[in-house]
Image: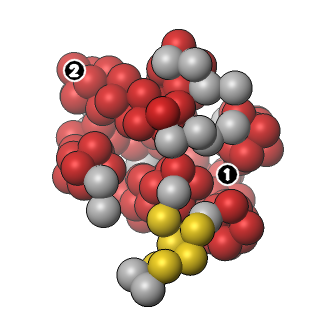
Amino acid sequence: MDNVVENVLKNIPDILRGNRKKLIENADAFGEHLARNKLSTSQIRNIFNEIKTMKKFEESKDRLLLLKPKLAYLAGRHGKRTRDGLVGAVPDMVKVLSRCIDEIHNEEDFENFKQFFEAVLAYHRYYGGE
Protein backbone atom coordinates (compact mmCIF):
# COMPACT_ATOMS: atom_id res chain seq x y z
CA MET A 1 0.00 0.00 0.00
CA ASP A 2 1.21 3.48 -0.85
CA ASN A 3 2.71 5.54 1.98
CA VAL A 4 0.21 8.39 1.35
CA VAL A 5 -2.72 5.99 1.73
CA GLU A 6 -1.25 4.47 4.89
CA ASN A 7 -0.78 7.93 6.39
CA VAL A 8 -4.34 9.00 5.58
CA LEU A 9 -5.75 5.78 7.02
CA LYS A 10 -3.76 6.38 10.20
CA ASN A 11 -5.10 9.95 10.50
CA ILE A 12 -8.79 9.26 9.84
CA PRO A 13 -9.78 9.23 13.54
CA ASP A 14 -8.23 12.68 14.06
CA ILE A 15 -9.73 14.01 10.84
CA LEU A 16 -13.22 12.85 11.78
CA ARG A 17 -12.88 14.24 15.31
CA GLY A 18 -12.28 17.72 13.90
CA ASN A 19 -8.51 18.20 13.61
CA ARG A 20 -8.57 20.76 10.79
CA LYS A 21 -4.80 20.79 10.31
CA LYS A 22 -4.76 17.03 9.68
CA LEU A 23 -7.87 17.26 7.51
CA ILE A 24 -6.21 19.80 5.20
CA GLU A 25 -2.77 18.14 5.15
CA ASN A 26 -4.23 14.71 4.41
CA ALA A 27 -6.77 15.99 1.88
CA ASP A 28 -3.95 17.78 0.06
CA ALA A 29 -1.64 14.74 -0.01
CA PHE A 30 -4.41 12.30 -0.89
CA GLY A 31 -5.93 14.56 -3.57
CA GLU A 32 -2.49 14.88 -5.18
CA HIS A 33 -1.97 11.09 -4.94
CA LEU A 34 -5.31 10.45 -6.67
CA ALA A 35 -4.62 12.99 -9.42
CA ARG A 36 -1.12 11.62 -10.08
CA ASN A 37 -2.53 8.11 -10.28
CA LYS A 38 -5.09 9.21 -12.89
CA LEU A 39 -8.32 9.03 -10.90
CA SER A 40 -11.02 10.62 -13.03
CA THR A 41 -13.64 12.84 -11.47
CA SER A 42 -16.36 10.83 -13.18
CA GLN A 43 -15.22 7.72 -11.28
CA ILE A 44 -16.22 9.33 -7.99
CA ARG A 45 -18.81 11.94 -8.97
CA ASN A 46 -21.82 9.71 -8.17
CA ILE A 47 -20.46 8.86 -4.71
CA PHE A 48 -19.68 12.50 -4.00
CA ASN A 49 -23.12 13.65 -5.16
CA GLU A 50 -24.83 11.04 -3.02
CA ILE A 51 -22.88 12.11 0.06
CA LYS A 52 -23.67 15.78 -0.61
CA THR A 53 -27.42 15.02 -0.52
CA MET A 54 -27.15 13.43 2.94
CA LYS A 55 -28.19 15.99 5.53
CA LYS A 56 -28.10 14.46 9.02
CA PHE A 57 -26.13 11.46 10.23
CA GLU A 58 -29.05 9.78 12.00
CA GLU A 59 -31.19 10.03 8.87
CA SER A 60 -28.36 8.92 6.57
CA LYS A 61 -26.74 6.01 8.45
CA ASP A 62 -28.21 3.32 6.21
CA ARG A 63 -27.44 5.21 2.99
CA LEU A 64 -23.91 5.79 4.21
CA LEU A 65 -23.37 2.10 4.93
CA LEU A 66 -24.81 1.17 1.55
CA LEU A 67 -22.10 3.25 -0.12
CA LYS A 68 -19.59 0.55 0.82
CA PRO A 69 -20.89 -1.98 -1.77
CA LYS A 70 -20.97 0.80 -4.39
CA LEU A 71 -17.38 1.64 -3.53
CA ALA A 72 -16.39 -2.03 -3.76
CA TYR A 73 -18.00 -2.18 -7.21
CA LEU A 74 -15.98 0.87 -8.34
CA ALA A 75 -12.77 -0.69 -7.05
CA GLY A 76 -13.51 -3.95 -8.84
CA ARG A 77 -14.38 -2.16 -12.04
CA HIS A 78 -11.49 0.29 -12.14
CA GLY A 79 -8.74 -1.38 -10.10
CA LYS A 80 -5.93 -3.47 -11.50
CA ARG A 81 -5.84 -7.03 -10.20
CA THR A 82 -2.57 -8.34 -8.82
CA ARG A 83 -1.60 -11.25 -6.58
CA ASP A 84 -1.94 -8.86 -3.63
CA GLY A 85 -5.44 -7.69 -4.58
CA LEU A 86 -6.70 -4.59 -6.31
CA VAL A 87 -4.34 -1.67 -6.86
CA GLY A 88 -4.74 1.78 -8.33
CA ALA A 89 -6.30 5.14 -7.53
CA VAL A 90 -9.88 3.87 -7.26
CA PRO A 91 -9.04 1.05 -4.80
CA ASP A 92 -6.99 3.57 -2.78
CA MET A 93 -9.94 5.95 -2.65
CA VAL A 94 -12.24 3.08 -1.68
CA LYS A 95 -9.94 2.03 1.19
CA VAL A 96 -9.95 5.54 2.60
CA LEU A 97 -13.67 6.23 2.19
CA SER A 98 -14.65 2.82 3.55
CA ARG A 99 -12.48 3.35 6.62
CA CYS A 100 -14.04 6.78 7.09
CA ILE A 101 -17.54 5.28 6.92
CA ASP A 102 -16.54 2.69 9.54
CA GLU A 103 -15.28 5.45 11.86
CA ILE A 104 -18.32 7.76 11.68
CA HIS A 105 -20.22 7.58 14.98
CA ASN A 106 -22.05 10.88 15.29
CA GLU A 107 -23.08 14.10 13.55
CA GLU A 108 -19.69 15.78 14.07
CA ASP A 109 -17.80 12.84 12.51
CA PHE A 110 -20.25 12.86 9.60
CA GLU A 111 -19.82 16.58 8.91
CA ASN A 112 -16.03 16.28 9.13
CA PHE A 113 -16.13 13.32 6.71
CA LYS A 114 -18.10 15.37 4.19
CA GLN A 115 -15.65 18.25 4.53
CA PHE A 116 -12.69 15.91 4.13
CA PHE A 117 -14.15 14.28 1.01
CA GLU A 118 -14.92 17.67 -0.50
CA ALA A 119 -11.37 18.88 0.27
CA VAL A 120 -9.86 15.75 -1.32
CA LEU A 121 -11.83 16.44 -4.50
CA ALA A 122 -10.75 20.09 -4.48
CA TYR A 123 -7.09 19.14 -4.18
CA HIS A 124 -7.55 16.38 -6.78
CA ARG A 125 -8.74 19.04 -9.20
CA TYR A 126 -5.98 21.46 -8.16
CA TYR A 127 -3.33 18.86 -8.98
CA GLY A 128 -4.75 18.27 -12.44
CA GLY A 129 -7.37 15.58 -11.87
CA GLU A 130 -9.84 15.48 -14.71
Residue at coordinates 41% horizontally, 36% vertically from top-left? Answer: 33
Q: How crowded is mark 1: few (under 14 residues within 10 Å), some or many (20 or more)?
A: few
Mark 2 to mark 1: distance in Å? Answer: 29 Å
Verify CB contact (< 8 Å) between mark 2 and mark 1: no
Point out residue 86 in the picture as x, y percentages from the top left corner. 51, 72
Q: How is the protein colored in the picture?
A: secondary structure
Image disc number at residue 46: none
Residue depicted at x 53% and y 13%: 126
Question: In what quadrant of the picture does the N terminus appear?
Answer: bottom left
* Residue underneath mark 1: 59
Q: Say above or below: 94 vs 110.
A: below
Q: What residue type is labelled 2?
A: Lys
Q: Is residue 85 above or below residue 58?
A: below
Q: Which of marks 2 and 1 is nearer the N terminus?
A: 2
Label 1, secondary structure: give it. Answer: helix
Give the camera-side residue of 5 and 67.
5
**Res. 115 visible in picture:** no
List the residue tagged with mark 2: 21
* Residue 128 seen in the figure: yes
Q: Between label 2 and label 1, give the one nearer the viewer.
A: 2
Dot 2: few (<14), some (14–19), or many (≥20) neighbours within 10 Å?
few
Task: Identify which residue, 87 or 16, lies in the foreground.
Answer: 87
